[in-house]
Amino acid sequence: MGKILVTGASGYIGGRLVPELRARGYKVRVMVRAPSPVFQELWPDVEIVAADALKLDQLQIALKDIDTAYYLIHSLLLGRKEFAVADIQAAINFRIAAQENHIKRIIYLGGLGETQTRLSSHLQSRIQVAEELKKGEVPVTTLRAAIIIGSGSASYEIIQHLVKRLPVILIPRWAMTKCQPIGIRDVIKYLVGVLETPATSGGSYDIGGKDILSYREMLKIRAALLNKKRFFIPFFSFLPLYSYVGGLITPIPAPITRALMEGLKNEVVCQNNAIRHYLPFDPLTYKEAIIRAMNREEQDRIHTRWSDAYPPAHELALKLNELKVGPQYTNTYSLLTQKDASSLFKCICTIGGNEGWFSNNWVWRLRGTIDKILLGVGAARGRKSRTTLRINDVIDYWRVEDLQKDARLLLRAEMKLPGKGWLEFKIQDEGSQRRLSINAYYQPHSFLGKVYWYAFLPFHQFLFNSLIKQIENRTYFGQAG
Ligand SMILES: NC(=O)c1ccc[n+]([C@@H]2O[C@H](COP(=O)([O-])OP(=O)(O)OC[C@H]3O[C@@H](n4cnc5c(N)ncnc54)[C@H](OP(=O)(O)O)[C@@H]3O)[C@@H](O)[C@H]2O)c1
């Protein structure tokens, strides 16, 4: 077989599909919007092409000499007003470019849901994307899934946070709707399976796990697995309230929570099991999928997480070194230490998530809570891994923009701010000692942005001074070994 293209490779599903295809010996090209050195590091033998599906000329290059293309593009993070338009346009462009490049086949993973019913805008859009792709001459294999359960999946984390944090769970009527969740392991099996089964070309298949459950039952099973006694109380259905509260108490951003919650009203159960004829393996039960995900978390082996993908076109993605002038404000906090660079860096790289910010944790958490109230990302996103850190990884309301081993960690602020902010940890040799510094950079958007900077300056001084001392204190000589 010729080369396989995986679009959406920076996303939850794509990031898990690529290693599987590589392990099976396929020649793979991945398409990402923001090519970072991390992809090359993760998949050294994979060709990486930068393309935005909203730009046809870029897609033409990405699809050149491709045999089969996986279509895993999804713009949910753009928010409810914009994602559907963007997703349709991306599908139209993809169809045109695939046809002009004589691609043999497209494999698309979309969502379950019946068009006869009133579907949520998210599910409706997933179906429209399939229809759009199919209008061309290139055969499209469509796989349709309900919620996907795996370590780091949005649905898994929403369920987990609700059950962990709420002793009493209010249950609206639509929590009784039926759903057929599927484990991420099985999704990847089906995605690879249809590639290796030419007879599935052009077909549409529903894929699901072994169980059909209501959302209430899913929460109950999850609570039992966590050994938590939870009370479920029927409550009136007012979706905006549930999605806002869901956004507040789970790490998932409001646009995703809202889209997923809107979809809860629709029954998402496989209508046909034709796929079992071609790929007759036994799918996991919901409970088995959860246990696998919990094990992955315990072993600190979460390969991809919903937070990995986000729109690089988003203004937050402007890099510090891309600022035309500025940043307008910089504050530096530093100290000299005898400790070695690699030990200091190792300590810095454990920051955030469950470890916290080494001191005054409540202040960092309070900032996260305020951000959540303002519909920002908040601090509950934590980190994907306790031990490893890569460029583009999330740390609470920050994202790693640059990481130079034993020298620099640059974090970009993703919380709501009237400007753009960065936090840089730096280690430099100074004679026989090391200078450890924290630099806070800030570029205000407006006058309000300037007020914000000065209003928070005393807090920053207090926080960053104590943080830098804590890093020094917590670093042991030779810790990096
Ligand atoms: N995850 C689930 O629970 C679930 C359940 C059922 C079905 N599915 C389906 O599975 C597919 C993949 O979902 P996912 O969870 O992996 O999504 P995801 O994590 O949100 O990733 C979406 C991917 O789309 C890329 N993308 C967005 N806009 C793009 C554009 N204009 N050009 C190029 N790439 C673009 C993103 O790249 P950037 O990093 O550049 O933003 C990212 O890699 C979707 O069709 C979804 O409907 C997922």
Image (cartoon, rainbow, N blue to C red):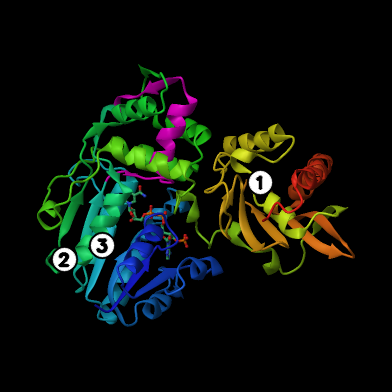
Quadrant in which the N terminus appears: bottom left
Q: Nearer the N terminus, badge 1 or badge 2?
A: 2
Residue to which mark 1 is pinned: 351
Identify which amino acid the numbered label 3 is placed on: Val
Secondary structure, mark 2, is loop
Residue to which mark 3 is pinned: 192
Secondary structure, mark 3, is helix
Camera-side residue of 159 and 406: 406
Furthest toward the right, the residue is: 431
> From what the image shows, is residue 283 above or below residue 325?
above
Are the residues tagged 3 and 1 within 8 Å (C-beta)?
Answer: no
Query: On the rendered structure, is 293 left or right of 436?
Result: left
Camera-side residue of 321 and 278: 278
Residue 65 is situated, as x and y percent measured from the top left of the image, at 32, 82
Residue 291 is situated, as x and y percent measured from the top left of the image, at 35, 38
Query: What are the residue bounds of the magenta stretch?
Result: 146-175
Quadrant in which the C terminus appears: bottom right
Q: Nearer the N terminus, badge 3 or badge 2?
A: 3
Count the marks: how many?
3
Q: Residues within 10 Å of mark 2 (few under 14, many from 20)?
A: few
Q: Is residue 2 visible?
A: yes
Residue 150 is situated, as x and y percent measured from the top left of the image, at 37, 45
Residue to which mark 2 is pinned: 197
Q: Residues within 10 Å of mark 3 (few under 14, many from 20)?
A: some
Identify which amino acid the numbered label 1 is placed on: Ile
